[in-house]
Amino acid sequence: MTKIFISVEGQTEETFVTEVLKPYFEPQQLYLIPVLVKTRRMPNAPDFRGGFVPYRKVKKELQGLLGDTSAAAVSTMYDFYALGRDFPGMDTIPNGSGRDRVAHLEQFLLGDIDSRRFRPYLQLHEFESFLFVDVETTANLLLGDNNALQELQNINRQFPTPEEIDDDPNSAPSKRIERIFPEYQKVLDGPLITIEVGLEKLRTTCAHFNAWLTWLESLV
């Protein structure tokens, strides 16, 4: 069994790796272990995990994971949306498509960590883009009516793929979902919807995500 560490930024991504990716890859002899980034430490108290973290802490944690030689590789699952300004390459990020900007940041992160066992993955633009892959399933599981479904469909028509839904603070995928479904709970509802949608449909619809999974499969 080949062990892979996936550094994740929050509980939603941790659950997604555990409940969706891990069962998919285990038959291929890949054992994925999600590791939540620690936000801060206090003496004699549990670590705080998840949420926005300064890059220096992210780098330290990635280097720590790479120090475990029992892992064949280390990767990440961080949202591109609202990524810190101190992230490598952020000061020279291009004005192109979301995919171009993410590729730019991934290359800078790859160079900064500088390990052949490391490959970064940044989610375009954030986890909630997955909820636009199959809007009928999303509307059904979030108990939406026909108007909610129509709103989701209208959003989908504006973009070639869910990965390209913009990262504006007012219209990022999560903001759109929360506006239509005010009771949406990211940690609980997000992974549940992706389980119902299925990994194959996520891969078919989200090219950047699929490229990451293809790399993981190459590690077998």
Image (cartoon, grey):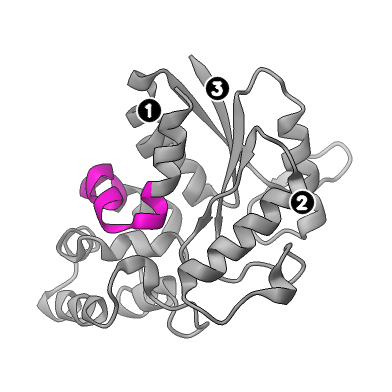
Question: What residue is drawn where x is 60% and y is 52%?
Answer: 9
**Quick check: 156 left or right of 84?**
left
Q: Mark 2 or mark 1: which comes first in sequence?
A: 1
How much space separates mark 2 and mark 3, taking CA atoms?
Answer: 23 Å
Image quarter where the C terminus lies is top left
Residue 196 on the magenta segment: yes
Asked if residue 184 can be seen in this view, the reply is no
* Magenta-colored span: 194-210
Disc 3 and disc 1 in contact, CB within 8 angstroms: no
Question: What residue is drawn where x is 35% and y is 69%?
Answer: 183
Q: Which residue is mark 2?
A: 112
Residue closer to the observer: 146 or 167: 167
Q: Mark 3 or mark 1: which comes first in sequence?
A: 3
Image vertical order of residue 23 relative to residue 80, above or below? above
Q: Which residue is mark 3?
A: 3
- The spot of residue 93 in percent (x, y) is 65, 74
- The spot of residue 98 in percent (x, y) is 48, 72
What amino acid does circle 2 point to? Asp
